[in-house]
Image (tube, rainbow, N blue to C red):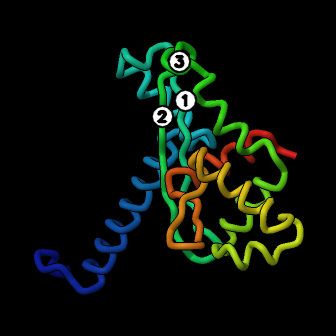
Amino acid sequence: MPDTSEPTAESTDIRAALAALSRRVDNLEGARATPPASSLWALDELRRQRAQHPSTAEGAVLLSGSVTLPGGTPVEWQQSASSSELLASEWGERSAAFAALGHPVRVELLRHVLNGVHGTAELAGIESLGTTGQLHHHLRQLLGAGWLRQSARGSYEVPASRVVPLLVCLAAVGK
C-alpha cells in the first residue's frame, strides 16, 4: 500500500490544475451574474447621478467627448447642466453663438481649422471661404462668438472647450 502522507508530484499537479479550474469557473459565474453593460452607459451614469443628487432630480444634460484631431491633438471635454437651469435661463444671450454657426462659410471655416489649417494665408487660399475680406468678416464673427481664438498673429484655433460642443452640434443635426 503506497504512503499517502507525502504528496507526489502528480498529486500536486492535479491539485494546482483543480485550483486553476475552480478559479476559472468562479470568474465565469461572476461574469454571468453581472448584467451586460448598457450601450447607453453615459445615460445610465447620468440617471445614477440624478438619483443621488437632489439638485439634478428634474433632469440634466451632459456633453462629453474624447477626440483626437487630425493633427494629433487630443481633446477631452465634459460639461453638464441642470435642465431646470437651462429651461429658466435667458436663451437670447446664447443666440450669437448659434448665429455664428448659421453661415455655411463659417461652418466650413471651422472644419478647416479643426483639420489643421490655422494660418490666415492658408485659409485665404481655400476658394470656398471667399475673398480675403469675406474671410476676415467670418473670422471676426467666429472669434466674437467664442468658436475660434487667435493662437498667434494670423493663426487661429478652435478652443478645446468648444471642440466637443461643436461636434455635438454637428451630430445633433445629423445629415
Residue that label 3 marks: 89
| Front position in the image: 25 or 135 | 135
Mark 3, Cα crowd under 10 Å, few <14 / some 14-19 / many 20+, is few
* Location of residue 114 (image quadrant): bottom right
**Position of 107 relative to 101 (above/below):** below
**N-term mark: 2 or 3:** 2
At 51% from the left and 25% from the top, the residue drawn is 60
Q: Secondary structure at mark 3?
A: loop
At 60% from the left and 44% from the top, the residue drawn is 145
Mark 2, Cα crowd under 10 Å, few <14 / some 14-19 / many 20+, is few
**Position of 124 relative to 21 (above/below):** below
Q: CA distance from mark 2 to mark 3?
A: 15 Å
Q: Is residue 102 left or right of residue 63?
A: right
State yes or no: discs 1 and 2 in contact (Cβ < 8 Å): yes
Q: Secondary structure at mark 1?
A: strand
Q: Secondary structure at mark 2?
A: strand
Residue that label 1 marks: 61
Residue that label 2 marks: 80
Mark 1, Cα crowd under 10 Å, few <14 / some 14-19 / many 20+, is few
**Position of 130 relative to 168 (above/below):** below
| Front position in the image: 53 or 48 | 53
